[in-house]
Image: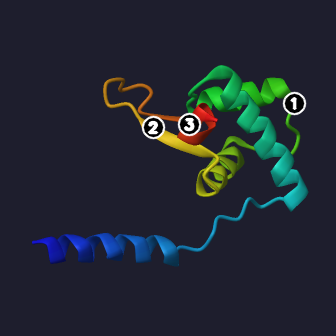
Amino acid sequence: MFVATGARCMARRLKAALKPPIDPKIPPEDAQTVSRVLYDIIREHGPLTVAEAWDHSKVAGLRALTSKKHMKIILKWMKERQMLKVICNPNDPYMPFVYSLGVCDKIC
């Protein structure tokens, strides 16, 4: 039983290691700027859905984000770099997934 559990755990780690990294589809300096602004928006306004983050980014005037789909790619890139976490809220059917800061940022 323990051998099978360990094998499944290792298989998941290997599968995650084989995924190609997410490409933000913008130059690295623009990706850093956009990610910093999105990070500040999420830090200031708390856990946000994608739609709420899009509304706040339009108010902030991010010109590098061309669409909501592009912002989702940037958010996934930030999640891959462990800048954000995705939290599932099963009690609220209208906001099942929200983006929030990592645990280490709240402690530090």
Distance Cα–Cα, label 2 vs label 3: 6 Å
- The front one of 55 and 19 is 19
> Mark 2, mark 1: which one is toward the viewer?
2
Q: Find residue 4 and name its label.
A: none
Judge the density around disc 2: few (<14), some (14-19), many (≥20) Cα neighbours within 10 Å.
some
Check whether the beta carbons of the residues at disc 2 and disc 3 lie within 8 A of each other.
Answer: yes
Q: Which residue is mark 3?
A: 99
Is residue 81 found left or right of 96 in the rendered image? right
Q: Label 2's element?
A: strand
Q: Residue at x 71, y 65 (%)?
A: 23
> Mark 1, mark 3: which one is toward the viewer?
3
Q: Find residue 61 and name its label.
A: 1
How far across and how far down the image is residue 56, in percent?
Answer: 73, 25
Q: Which residue is mark 2?
A: 87
Q: Quadrant of residue 103?
A: top right
How far across and how far down the image is residue 75, in percent?
Answer: 64, 47
Image quarter where the C terminus lies is top right
Q: Label 1's element?
A: loop
Tag 2: amino acid:
Ile
Judge the density around disc 3: few (<14), some (14-19), many (≥20) Cα neighbours within 10 Å.
many
- The front one of 65 and 81 is 81
Name, please, the residue furthest toward the left. Answer: 1
